[in-house]
Structure formats: structure tokens, C-alpha cells
Amino acid sequence: MFQRLIDDFKDSTGTTLRMISLAAAAAMALLVTTGFLCAAAFVLVLQKYGPVQACLTGAAIFFVVTLIAAGSYMMRKRRIEARVEQAAKTAKSTAQTVLADPMLVAAGIQVIRAIGVKKLIPILAVGGLALGFLASRANASGSASEAPAE
């Protein structure tokens, strides 16, 4: 069983590494292509109109690229915020549904009676610590998933 988990992990890691290397190669090729296109536009405008207009044309091209990148960043950030809000609403409604279930409340009362209140207090303390740790860990992973979008 563990060998299968390890093999799956190795396969997914290898696939992820190959995808990252392909994306890096594509990004590098796009950077070189953009550089040559900008140089060609600069030379064309330089020959036809002069150096000042060529520089202004280059600045305009990079300004348009910056506007496109900023717009896509803002749209992605809004999508992430909407997804986080939707997940919070879903988690809140799920928690309310679970706590409102009479069968769960009855089972909890039976567990308290069977174990006893004095023995249950340390168990609840450890459970509270574990829940706090998991909540802080979930917050850390949520902020980590938003960090690349900034």
C-alpha cells in the first residue's frame, strides 16, 4: 500500500517537474520573441520617423503590455477572492448543519455520559489544540495560494 502511494507521488512529482520545465522553456521563448518584435518595431519607426518617435512607440508598446498584465492580475485576484468567499459560506453552512443535527447531539451526549466529564476535559483540550493547528494551517495554505496572484 505504501509502495503504491510512493510510486504515485514519484509519478506526480515527475509529471509536475516536466510541466514546469516546459512552461519555463515556453516563457523564455516568448521573452526572446517579444524582444525581437520590439527591436523590429523600434528599427522600423526609427528609419521612418526618427529616434524620439521610435522611443515613444516602444514605450507605448510596453505600456499596453503592462495594462493587459494588470487587467489579468485584477481579474484573477477577484476570482480568487470570490472562490474564497464561496468556500467560507459553504464551510459555515456545513458546520451549522452538522451542529443542528439532533442525532449528532444525542451521540455527543451519550459519549459524554459513557466517558465521564472529568476524563473528557483533557480529550477536548487536545482536540481544541488540534483544531486550532488545523485552522492555522488552512489559513497559511489559503494565503499561500493567494500569494502568487499578488
Image (tube, rainbow, N blue to C red):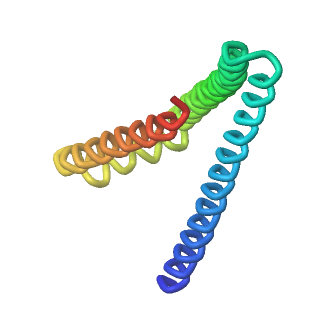
x%, y% of residue 139? 41, 36
Q: On the picture, is 55 further left or further right than 139?
A: right
x%, y% of residue 123? 24, 50
Q: Nearer the viewer, residue 12 or 36?
A: 36
Q: Nearer the viewer, residue 149 or 123?
A: 149
Q: On the picture, is 147 further left or further right than 126?
A: right
x%, y% of residue 106? 47, 42
x%, y% of residue 104? 50, 43
Q: Is residue 146 visible?
A: yes
**What residue is shown at x 39% (from left), y 48% (from top)?**
110
* The quarter of the displayed image where residue 129 is located: top left
Q: Nearer the viewer, residue 26 or 44?
A: 44
Q: Nearer the viewer, residue 105 or 150?
A: 150
* The quarter of the displayed image where residue 136 is located: top left
**What residue is shown at x 68% (from left), y 54% (from top)?**
26
Q: On the picture, is 53 further left or further right than 4?
A: right
Residue 122 against residue 101 in the figure, above or below:
below
Q: Is residue 78 visible?
A: no
Residue 147 against residue 24 in the figure, above or below:
above
